[in-house]
Amino acid sequence: MERVPAVRRRRLGEELRRLRDLSGLTSGEAALRAGWHQSKVSRIETGRSTVTVADVGVLLDVYAVRDRRVRDLLTMLAGRAHRRGWWHEFRDVLPVEYRDFITLETGAGRILSMENSVVPGLLQTPAYARALTAGVMPQLAADEVAALAEVRTARQSVLRQDPPPRLEAVLDEAVLRRDVGGPEVMDGQLAHLEEAARLPHVRLRVVPFGAGGHPGVTNSFVIFEFPQMPELDVVVVDHLTGSLHVDRTEDVAAYTAAFTGLRARALPCEESAALIAGIRAGSAR
């Protein structure tokens, strides 16, 4: 699979080609009006060449695109290819695919998260993040564990954006009952989930053990949606040695259908919050 920047570059090129087709121009005519060589338009449309914000602006003017939402989104996508995010300072400890994941997370309009083992990163407390990182990667030094835990905490700033993305998280009940870091850490984590569930842009549901087997048992996954341009939606699937980015339209649709099915099998938000509170109360005894 391609890395996220390559996926975005290709999808951006496809959208620019679609807009050119709608304008009735050939690539040669578009290049002539832009003052470019035809090969530049071709490289941009096929994703073989990085497109700058200025290039996007020129092409949108050539294609007479006036829709401000379309212009803003395509300009944003081009800009993110060159902008250094806050995570750049952690590049020594973050694998490339993790940086790509954060890039998607910061730009999505809606995030659908299915977790079968651990609390989603956007909802982890610092203490839980440290305990989890140390447990999953015992080979790391203490400063590396601290840095990775800090990244998970920093990622949560996306939920305080204006406007923030909509987060829909479906958790297997095992996530709530797995002891990560001990009773005190888990009490704080469960309390944090209760608070997060009350946020207007967060929907938290739990699939109880009584629901039996379900599609999320074998793999956790996250769907990043871009409502203004669904063609850019991407699924990230966890596996043993890393993660896989899935962007084919039919595959994204399959994962979205699976998430919809899981959401239907999960407890409603209010009952999920009550379950979390009950587990927390039981663990405090």
Image (tube, helix red, strand yellow):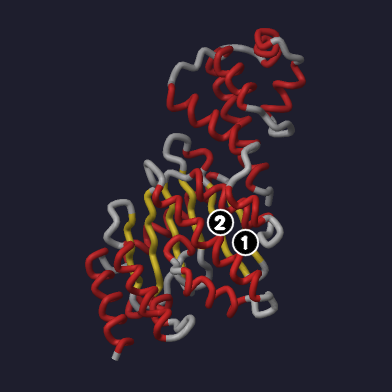
Q: Residue furthest front?
A: 143
Q: Hey, which quadrant is residue 62 in on the image?
A: top right
Q: Amino acid at mark 2?
A: Val
SS category of the residue bearing label 1: strand
Residue visible at 23% across and 70% down?
271
* Residues at discs 1 and 2 in contact (Cβ within 8 Å): yes
Left or right of 26: which side holds 75?
A: left
Q: Please name whichever residue, 243 or 254, is drawn nearer the observer in this view of the structure.
A: 243
Residue visible at 41% across and 45% down?
161
Quarter of the picture holding the C terminus: bottom left
- Mark 1 to mark 2: distance in Å? 6 Å
Q: List x then y, in percent, for residue 92.
A: 71, 59
Left or right of 204: which side holds 108?
A: right
SS category of the residue bearing label 2: strand
Residue visible at 37% across and 61% down?
261
* Residue 273 in view of the camera: yes
Q: List x then y, in percent, for residue 211.
A: 34, 75
Pointer 2 residue: 236
* Dot 1 crowding, Cα within 10 Å, few <14, some 14–19, many 20+: some
* Residue 20 in view of the camera: no
Q: Which mark is residue 243?
A: 1
